[in-house]
Image: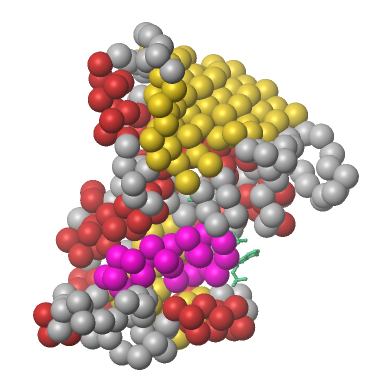
């Protein structure tokens, strides 16, 4: 970890007192007799936040529950939107990342921007040696992600990438099943609705559905089964009457071969009004399915197993975003980049895989 981190740490770490909500710890709820006296509470990390959209709304409650951070600064393109977040969650509103870093000296930053904006923010944070968790995907275009990787050469910095499926609490059980009977076929399906943000519909802003969304399936497959090569892929675009501006492909399918010998078949589409999102691992006599249930309040996950005697479905006991954010805070506190659930280099391997899929389709994404 560079000296810059230590310096910031000394400046910015705040004792775990519970000031009135305003510039408050993220957790402003739950004050009560059961809480330890402030002098006994651990120091909290000061946190910066960039982006005030949907996924930010999943992280902030998690961080409140974890109760290990103080929200110091929020960056938005609009002062009003930044203030709307700080008014509820604490911290000071900013409209520029550099200014926020100068003013607040956060110990760590959360980047929740559209894919085409993400790499520029990451590069600023790397230049200033500020640990960060950035949402997936790494970028809309491959060149931006590779530029960040080049910036990271020789830099020892905690960086986590938001492949939150890695935080699913039942993955050890999945690994156990696969150790007993290896996957022969890996079937990924991200078949669902068109996400609402306008940027999502445009390849230059999102990278397209494989890069932005189905990437979770490819990452989970790499994580559980191993590395894979793309053996072929196809995609198609059909115009949308409701969104004539949309240029992302509407459907895509890819065939992969994993280093283990397993074959992969991955499909995705956004033309539906319902969702089936799952990664199915097929072994001799066994199905093991990681299933995501989309919902307006945020996704949920369950593990489905079938050993020939009917399906059993077990929901997660813990929010994977919470597991992920906790591991990131652990990594920041320990100054140990390897403690992040998904490092930048690991995410880049997923990024290269999904871009190989897109390249094999012959389309832009
Ligand atoms: N891991 C997951 O499960 C998961 C789930 C959903 C999304 N994500 C990822 O998280 C990132 C953000 O997604 P989201 O769903 O939160 O998107 P969103 O709701 O559209 O929010 C994006 C935020 O980025 C800021 N922004 C800056 N420049 C922008 C621009 N030119 N156009 C639009 N917004 C801009 C906006 O904040 P201001 O307007 O305040 O500046 C906006 O609040 C994406 O990379 C996405 O892939 C991950």
Residue 332 versus residue 253 in the image, above or below: below
Q: Is 55 covered by the magenta stretch?
A: yes
Where's residue 294, x and y in %?
56, 45
Report ligand 1 position as a quadrant.
bottom right
From the image, which quarter does the C terminus lie in? Answer: top right
In what quadrant of the picture does the N terminus appear?
A: bottom left
Labels in figure, total: 0
Q: Position of residue 111 (x, y in %)?
A: 46, 63
Q: Is residue 235 visible?
A: yes
How far across and down, in percent of the image, does residue 17 sit?
23, 85
* Bounds of the magenta segment: 49-70
Q: Note whether 289 is above or below 339 in the view shown.
A: above
Which quarter of the figure has residue 191? top right
Colour scheme in use: secondary structure
- Residue at 30% x, 14% y is 181
Q: Is residue 63 above or below residue 91?
A: above
Q: 151 left or right of 203?
A: left
Q: Is residue 5 left or right of residue 222?
A: left
Give the quadrant of residue 126.
bottom left
Q: Position of residue 135 (x, y in %)?
A: 47, 55
Say whether residue 362 is magenta. Answer: no
Q: Residue shown at 43%/62% (left/top)?
A: 59
Q: Is residue 1 visible?
A: no
Residue occupying image coordinates x 25% and y 16%: 180
Q: Residue furthest top?
A: 284
Q: Is residue 155 left or right of residue 229?
A: left
In the image shown, does 268 or 354 lie closer to the viewer?
A: 268
């Amino acid at each position: 970890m560079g000296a810059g981190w230590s310096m910031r740490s000394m400046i910015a770490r705040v004792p775990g007192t519970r000031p009135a909500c305003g510039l408050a710890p993220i957790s402003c709820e739950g004050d009560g007799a059961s809480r330890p006296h402030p002098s006994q509470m651990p120091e909290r990390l000061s946190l910066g936040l960039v982006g005030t959209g949907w996924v930010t709304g999943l992280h902030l409650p998690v961080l409140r529950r974890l109760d290990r951070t103080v929200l110091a600064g929020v960056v938005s393109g609009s002062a009003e939107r930044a203030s709307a977040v700080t008014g509820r969650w604490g911290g000071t509103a900013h409209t520029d990342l550099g200014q926020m870093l100068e003013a607040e000296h956060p110990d760590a930053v959360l980047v929740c921007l559209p894919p085409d904006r993400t790499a520029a923010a990451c590069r600023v944070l790397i230049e200033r040696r500020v640990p960060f968790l950035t949402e997936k995907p790494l970028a809309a275009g491959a060149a931006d992600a590779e530029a960040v990787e080049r910036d990271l050469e020789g830099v020892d910095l905690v960086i986590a990438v938001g492949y939150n499926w890695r935080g699913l609490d039942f993955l050890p059980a999945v690994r156990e099943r696969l150790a007993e009977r290896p996957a022969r076929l890996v079937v990924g399906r991200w078949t669902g609705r068109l996400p609402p943000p306008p940027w999502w519909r445009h390849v230059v802003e999102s990278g397209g559905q494989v890069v932005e969304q189905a990437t979770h399936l490819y990452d989970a497959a790499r994580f559980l089964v191993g590395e894979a090569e793309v053996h072929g892929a196809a995609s198609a675009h059909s115009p949308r009457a409701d969104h004539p501006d949309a240029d992302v492909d509407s459907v895509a399918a890819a065939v992969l071969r994993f280093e283990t010998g397993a074959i992969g078949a991955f499909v995705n589409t956004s033309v539906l009004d319902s969702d089936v999102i799952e990664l199915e691992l097929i072994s001799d006599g066994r199905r093991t399915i990681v299933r995501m249930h989309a919902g307006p309040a945020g996704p949920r996950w369950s593990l489905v197993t079938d050993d020939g005697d009917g399906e059993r479905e077990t929901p997660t006991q813990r929010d994977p975003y919470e597991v992920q954010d906790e591991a990131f805070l652990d990594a920041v506190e320990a100054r140990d980049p390897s403690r992040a659930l998904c490092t930048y280099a690991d995410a880049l391997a997923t990024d290269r895989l999904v871009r190989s899929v897109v390249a094999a389709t012959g389309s832009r994404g």
